[in-house]
Image (spheres, rainbow, N blue to C red):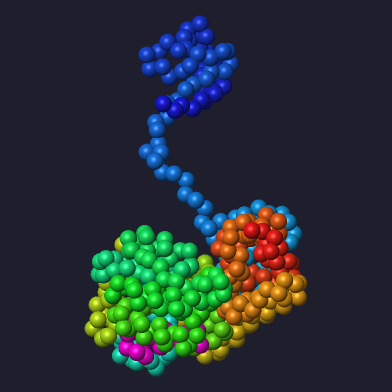
Amino acid sequence: MASSMLSLGSTSLLPREINKDKLKLGTSNSKPFLKAKSFSRVTMTVAVKPSRFEGITMAPPDPILGVSEAFKADNNEMKLNLGVGAYRTEELQPYVLNVVKKAENLMLERGDNKEYLPIEGLAAFNKATAELLFGAGHPVIKEQRVATIQGLSGTGSLRLAAALIERYFPGAKVVISSPTWGNHKNIFNDAKVPWSEYRYYDPKTIGLDFEGMIADIKEAPEGSFILLHGCAHNPTGIDPTPEQWVKIADVIQEKNHIPFFDVAYQGFASGSLDEDAASVRLFAERGMEFFVAQSYSKNLGLYAERIGAINVVCSSADAATRVKSQLKRIARPMYSNPPVHGARIVANVVGDATMFSEWKAEMEMMAGRIKTVRQELYDSLVSKDKSGKDWSFILKQIGMFSFTGLNKAQQSDNMTDKWHVYMTKDGRISLAGLSLAKCEYLADAIIDSYHNVS
């Protein structure tokens, strides 16, 4: 049995008047003490029961958030954190949107309270987020065919949908892209929803394996949920073309699958809310039923506010009402109701014409900075690499991420160990964490790792 040793000074727990001749340590039946070497210092053994949690092992560090911890411990002045998808300024500092500050000031001026929200969240937010996604005049909104409830950002919204699938589509499989955002598999595993993968990334072209994608969607069991990234695919930054989206919709309809969109970057990828929602609206125009999880972490910089939504597009208003009731039923024991602060920010920004215009301008600015950095990185790679390698895939990708083609763990390790560039092991870098001033340095690191590390 494990034990711990506790040293006790004679002036604390032992009365001064105790005669050491009368104190016979180690002879008591209860054996509370071990025999001490001197009167002035008594050593006591306290029995400790084995922990009921002995069977719980240490969890591995998160593959993305763990990168930030390693970055913080590095003292090299050239270090770069390109692991976490969070926007940074040219000075590599976090950025709070001006329009967010205005919305928060408005909340203070109004004296908004902190009362509980309903289970489904803030009504003004739910209306605004559905209209941003589909367009205010879209038939699915006019006909009340969208069940929308506020979720805990994109992750929480995905988790609600996963619970709905597990409960009402038992045995149905979610088919996700290979690769995909690292948390997708965790979400479906925890919800006990089976999943498989469809081909997406082609390492030979560092582009989209469209034929493989289509073939795998066709082969999936009829009625599967096909998880699609609405725009700015994470981690590759590779999106289907508009023509390819049409073909994807065709195949999903033919196989009677259910689309499941993850939209984490609307307005943040291209700088246009409408352009980044085009894929979702294509499916809505076809009258299909599907899920859409939304997040405002990136496009409004509300990372810590955990604000998002799950939308279920149904064939009728009656079906939408029933689906919404069950989503609320799932949310109630999970977290009761969502937080209000981020929801009010979104509702205020979208609901005010002036702030809405300012938001769109700031999104264009953020998206524009990432595009500029992407171009500068490409230019640096082309000018420095004399091997003739085609780096054009850097420009073909979109959004905050770039798949560098460093697809071997040793290459990613070299980026970190030698160059102090922190990134995920799959070769993904976040261009949102890169400045123009460090593009040449990053290009040197990529070229060295690509050509000199096998």
Q: Position of residue 294 (x, y in %)?
A: 44, 76
Residue 361 or residue 63, whichever sits in front = 63
x%, y% of residue 64? 54, 60
Using the rendered view, name the quadrant where residue 228 is placed: bottom left
Q: Quadrant of residue 94?
A: bottom right
Residue at x 24%, y 77% (from the top left corner): 322
Residue at 29% of width from left, 80% of height from top?
256
Residue segment shown in magenta: 275-291
Q: Does residue 153 appear left or right of residue 81 in this picture?
A: left
Q: Quadrant of residue 199?
A: bottom left
Total residue callouts: 0
* Left or right for 176, reference 267: left
Q: Is residue 410 visible?
A: yes
Residue 290 is a magenta residue: yes
- Residue beneath the point at 27% across and 85% down: 315
Residue 116 seen in the figure: no
